[in-house]
Image (cartoon, rainbow, N blue to C red):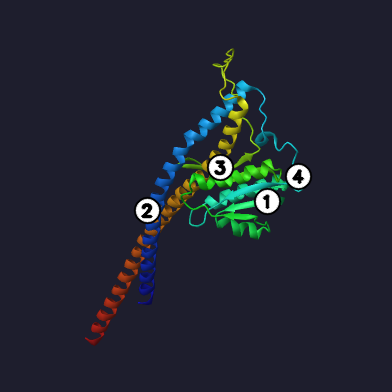
Amino acid sequence: MGKTREIKKRIKAVGNITRITRTMQMIATSKFARAQIRATATKPYTEGIFDLVTELARTAGNLEHPLIDGPAGGFKPEAKELTLLITSDRGLCGPYNGNVLRTATKLFDEHPSAKAGDIELVGKKGEAFLRFNNIPVAKRHEIGDSPTFAQIERLANGYMDRFIAGEVTAVRVIYMRFISAGRQRPEVLNLLPLKPPAEAESSDRKGMSLQYEFSPDEAELLAELLPSTVRTSLFQAINDAIVSEHVARMVAMKAATDNAGAMGKDLTRIYNRARQAQITTELTEIISGAAALD
């Protein structure tokens, strides 16, 4: 009886786990659907901004701006690099945080100046990793699952102000880029200084020289487009990180639900066999006892 009782307890525990993981999968699926809409809706605008900067770079020649060349007076002696590491606040999202943190470790190994610089954090899961590796966190930002553009704009403006003032020499963002529901990739985004996109070599453009009249002039356009590029790039990176987290949790919880269901079936089969053996043993004892009395 003791064995069947133990198996029955395990079946009940696995059933509870299955209900929890299925519920978490449904919640993650709902959040993923909303986050995917936000992430894909912002991409055309982000790509449009880059196209405008590319066209301006192609037609206006050499571009000069503090966000590209750095402050006019140079960087301060105490200026450091700044790295923004985007992780999740909650766990149970498969390899999501592990992949991002491995990318961060690789960056810190290849660029000791990044590790020695200011490291800012989004999400609680990266805090324990940095503490374990004795890497101090300069600041932790509370972003949430549905950040607004105004919220990210303040963060981007702060980075641009510090870069133009010569307080930081570079700004990098380590995040999970969302490509599709089945593919996400950890990346390092060089947010500042901005590098104008290189001119694409295309057979359609060879031998073609278009002349543009700018109104307002190139400098004024640049002063508006480059800060917008920084803001939208950071906003897109954070949206990509959020939707990647939700899809990773959705996949992880589906796998956990499937595994728990399979384990429940195996335990039920083991329980039935144990119960059948127990009943057979009891019947054998009864028949043997009756035979002995005769």
The earlier-in-sequence mark between 2 and 1 is 2
- Badge 4 crowding class, 10 Å Cα cut-off, few under 14, some 14 to 19, many 20 or more, is few
Tell me the element at label 2: helix
Disc 4 or 3, which lies upstream in sequence? 4
Is disc 4 in contact with disc 2, using a CB cutoff of under 8 Å? no
Mark drawn on residue 26: 2
Marks 4 and 2 sit apart, C-alpha to C-alpha, by: 51 Å
Q: Indicate the position of residue 246 as horizontal and vertical percent values.
A: 45, 50
The residue labelled by disc 4 is 76
Percent across and percent down for residue 147 are 48, 48
For this rendering, which residue is in front, 68 or 86? 68
Residue 31 visible here: yes
Q: Amino acid at mark 4?
A: Lys
Question: Which residue in the rendered view is the most extreme toward the bottom?
Answer: 293
Residue designated by label 1: 118
Eye-nearest disc, 2 or 1: 1
Percent from the top left, x then y, of residue 214?
A: 57, 22
Quarter of the N terminus within the rendering: bottom left
Comes first in the chain, label 3 or label 1: 1
Nearest the eye: 104 or 86: 86
Marks 2/1: CA–CA distance: 38 Å
The residues tagged by marks 4 and 1 sit, at their Cα atoms, a distance apart of 15 Å
